[in-house]
Image: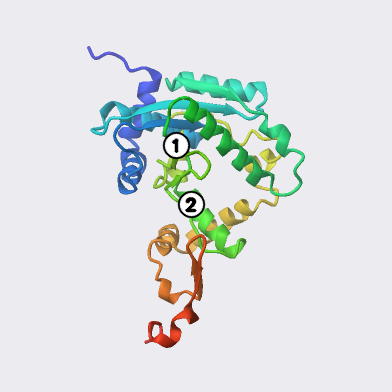
Amino acid sequence: MENEMTRAEEIMSSVVRKFRKPIWCKFLEGIKTYEMIKENDKIAVCISGGKDSMLMAMCIKQLSKYTKIPFTAEFLVMDPGYEPENRQRIIDNAALLDIPIHIFDAKIFDAVEVIGKNPCYMCARMRRGYLYKNAKELGCNKIALGHHFDDVIETILMGMLYGSQMQTMMPKLHSENFEGMELIRPMYMVREADIINWRDYNDLHFLNCACSVTKTIDVTGDGGSKRQEIKQLLRQLRAVDTKIDMHIFRSVENVNLRTLISYHDGGEYHHFLDDYDEGRSIKDSKK
């Protein structure tokens, strides 16, 4: 008789079998396409307690067992000031999914509660710094965050509509403040709807946003959040064109600099008039 699988093994099996195409294959595609994992990497898998980071942790743990590229992973949980029941939920879910976590404390919520404007932005920056610091202390050279494909699309639109800029959430980045450290996003090609389907199929219950400042926005979707406005806009656009997300994504893969009025590379700015009279401008786009 075959041995019965543990609950964690059943849940992981659902990823590589039932949700193989939308989750497991997309997870592998993102890692391979953007060369996120290299030989002998030691990756700090950052777990917030939500569905995205928990699924990412399971996938990376599974990959580390069977990949041809040897790497190791540490599973890092930062407690930025969770209520005791929320912290315990993370611990319980990690045990259920057989994820060996390291927990450290950071009083970030206390700091951002006094910020009147853009508390989420400041919270994200502070979280990132703490994660890099603790990951480096564990001997890691990379941190992995659970951002998914929908996060990427929303970021593109938010930059255009509210930030007056064309940018995207990159699949990986070199740290500017922690030498030798990188950030990777292994869930980059996985859609949120598929993560939700996997969660519900396995009857799992994760944290949403456990921050006292924004939990009403994140739980109910009503509270004036710009990201929530973008989510609503995308729902309307998807009703018209089911491929709208991929169109938006391809737009930042298929940028023709000669069709832009101006652009910069992080420092130096370039304007189309700089070389317009030298004959290097494009022909009338209508032709």
Q: How many marks?
A: 2
Report crowding for label 1: few under 14, some 14 to 19, many 20 or more residues within 10 A (C-alpha): many
Image quadrant assignment for residue 70: top left
Closer-to-camera residue (59/258): 258
The residue to which callout 1 is attached is: 144
Closer-to-camera residue (85/162): 162
Q: Position of residue 188 (x, y in %)?
A: 42, 46
Q: Amino acid at mark 2?
A: Met
Picture residue at 39% right of the left edge, 21% below the top: 8
Picture residue at 50% right of the left edge, 31% below the top: 47
Q: Position of residue 89 (x, y in %)?
A: 57, 23
Identify whether 85 is placed above or below 32. Answer: above
Q: Quadrant of the N terminus?
A: top left
Report crowding for label 2: few under 14, some 14 to 19, many 20 or more residues within 10 A (C-alpha): some
Closer-to-camera residue (283/41): 41
Picture residue at 43% right of the left edge, 30% below the top: 140
Q: Amino acid at mark 1?
A: Ala
Q: Position of residue 164 (x, y in %)?
A: 59, 65
Q: Position of residue 142 (x, y in %)?
A: 42, 36
